[in-house]
Image (spheres, rainbow, N blue to C red):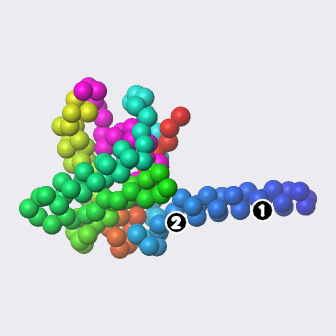
Amino acid sequence: MTRLIAIIIATLAVTTTFAAASDRYAGYYYPEITSTENFTRVIREAPQSSKAVRVEFVTNLTVAQLAAPESPRFVFFAKGDDARHLTVIALDDEVFSSIYRARAVLAQMTSNMRNNDFFRQQNLQFVATFYDLLQFMEFDTLVVSDGETWSHEVTFVRN
């Protein structure tokens, strides 16, 4: 009985530690996670990615936003030791007023990504999504949030 209790306590401690580590940005950059999903599709093996690739990707997205004539309505940033945690936070009350609007913005990002050289060279422009691109770059998670009431976390699972 004592052994069973010790196993249960150890399991709870590991689970709690893992959850705290994976969600250490909740409550600071965005509200607590309110919904989750796993993205498990791997269209094909991609070249090995790195922190530099992920940081450059986020930097390029930010530069493109700042070059546009209108002010950005959401912000991207990568966090974590290897920049494996991508976060997208709304900067106003309308753009991500629901998870459905946030998913629509992510779908629009898919359309924009399909026009880039990488997708065309890899013959992925008709099948790959924004999530596939994040999977290729070896992001572990994506959190999208209205910055006020909800946060949705996507975990990228690779075999």
Residue behind mark 2: 24
Q: Which residues are magenta?
A: 121-144
Q: Amino acid at mark 2?
A: Arg
Q: Is residue 140 magenta?
A: yes
Q: Is residue 155 magenta?
A: no
Residue behind mark 1: 9
**Position of residue 9 in the picture relative to residue 73 (left or right):** right
Q: Residues within 10 Å of mark 1 (few under 14, many from 20)?
A: few
**Position of residue 140 in the picture relative to residue 118 (left or right):** right
User: Do the CB atoms of the residues marked 1 and 2 lie less than 8 Å apart?
Assistant: no
Q: Residue furthest front?
A: 52
Q: Nearer the viewer, residue 114 or 53?
A: 53
Q: Residue at x 35, y 64 (%)?
A: 145
Q: Residue at x 65, y 63 (%)?
A: 16
x, y percent for residue 126: 24, 31
Query: Can residue 159 be seen at all in this image of the molecule?
Result: yes
Res. 130 image quadrant: top left
Q: Amino acid at mark 1?
A: Ile
Res. 30 image quadrant: bottom left
